[in-house]
Amino acid sequence: MDSWYLDNLCCPRDGANLRLEAERLICREGHQYPVVDGIPVMLLDDVRQTIGLAECSLRLARAGSDPSGLYLDSLGINARERLGVAALAVKGNGKIDPVVAYIIAATNGLMYKPMLGKLRRYPIPEIPLPDGHSEELLDVGCNWGRWSIAASQRGWKVTGIDPSLGAIMSARRVAQSMGLSIRYVVADGRYLPFRSNRFKAAYSFGVLQHLSREDVATALRQIARVLAPAGICLVQMPNNLGLRSVYQQARRRFRLARDFEVRYWSIHDLRKAFSVAIGSPAQVWVDAFGGLGIHKADLDLMSPGRKLVIVCSEILKKISRALPFLVYFADSVYVKAVKAPDGPMVS
């Protein structure tokens, strides 16, 4: 296992240092976390999980290495999709990792549903961050690693976390196939297993929207803890007044979200939550109109109808720069807050 992990990881329960013994990381209080094929699995087994995949990952990690390396039970895909993953894995020599080929719609959005099992290239988006210059970035909820790759290609030293063991293994395979050095950890964003003040930036896309407001607040406090002073927190969230957002809420009759369903936030509530947790006034700007997971970098992968959605979204984004009030009607927004340089330092 990379020595970086021992230098930067800590027990997510008590913050204590960890030592490696017999493929397990152990803290002074005796809390143990398995290491599977060099990947630390830092999930807690005595807390309420936000997604069932975490429990599957824990079970698989305790069982030991999967010879196939796929860890299918932790991917959250149906039986037909599992067969597709297994068939692609046996076929081999493909340009696309078999796991990515079949989780693309679940991770990237419904725009990618027609590509299930037919992906021609990895859809790597443009991350809205400055170049990293070898500074550390944490990707919270990285899944198969598309944003981790995007950040790494911009010069960041990236660590990605996700509760899915199968997704993390896939992320590592994809990064290695692209010649990128990215570290991955199986972990929960509410219980980050990193020492404080470690990262220059924390990024998350399409993840916190699935958590309750209480869990979002907890995750943001953890992000603030692991950010270095003046570190950047940048998170994509859904806006409740976007056209597609209103449609989705109407489909469920505007009831409260359950389980892993998307929670839709107001711009006011987003600014307040991020400002309070990170410690500086939060900024909000448009990511996309017409839905979530709409990226101009993927135009060549889309059908004509979906291309039109992307083009319209990009036009509206440009207009919103001159008419800032349009952010209130975007479906997907970015929220940015910066940790105060003289903010609380947690050891």
Image (spheres, rainbow, N blue to C red):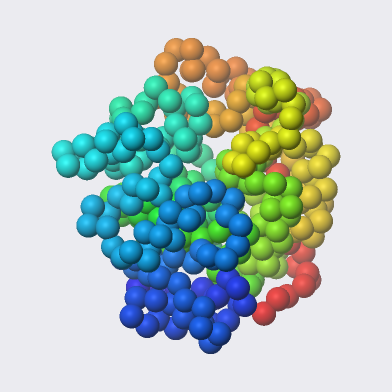
Residue 305 drawn above or below residue 19? above
Percent coordinates x, y for residue 204 in the rendering: 58, 48
- Note whether residue 54 is visible: yes
Quadrant in the picture for the N terminus: bottom left
- Note whether residue 319 is visible: no
Percent coordinates x, y for residue 131 in the rendering: 54, 52
Nearest the eye: 178 or 165 = 165
Nearest the eye: 83 or 119 = 83
Quadrant in the picture for the C terminus: bottom right
Percent coordinates x, y for residue 75 in the rendering: 40, 45
Q: 9 left or right of 76?
A: right
Name the residue: 43% across, 54% down: 56
Nearest the eye: 53 or 130 = 53
Q: 224 left or right of 101?
A: right
Q: As drawn, which residue projects farthest toward the bottom?
A: 28
Q: 309 left or right of 98?
A: right
Percent coordinates x, y for residue 224 in the rendering: 69, 63
Name the residue: 33% across, 42% down: 99
Residue 257 drawn above or below residue 16? above
Name the residue: 46% across, 80% down: 26
Residue 256 drawn above or below residue 169? above
Nearest the eye: 345 or 251 = 251
Residue 243 drawn above or below residue 79? above
How many numbered dots are placed on residues in this image? 0
Name the residue: 54% across, 65% down: 44
Q: Quadrant of residue 240?
A: top right
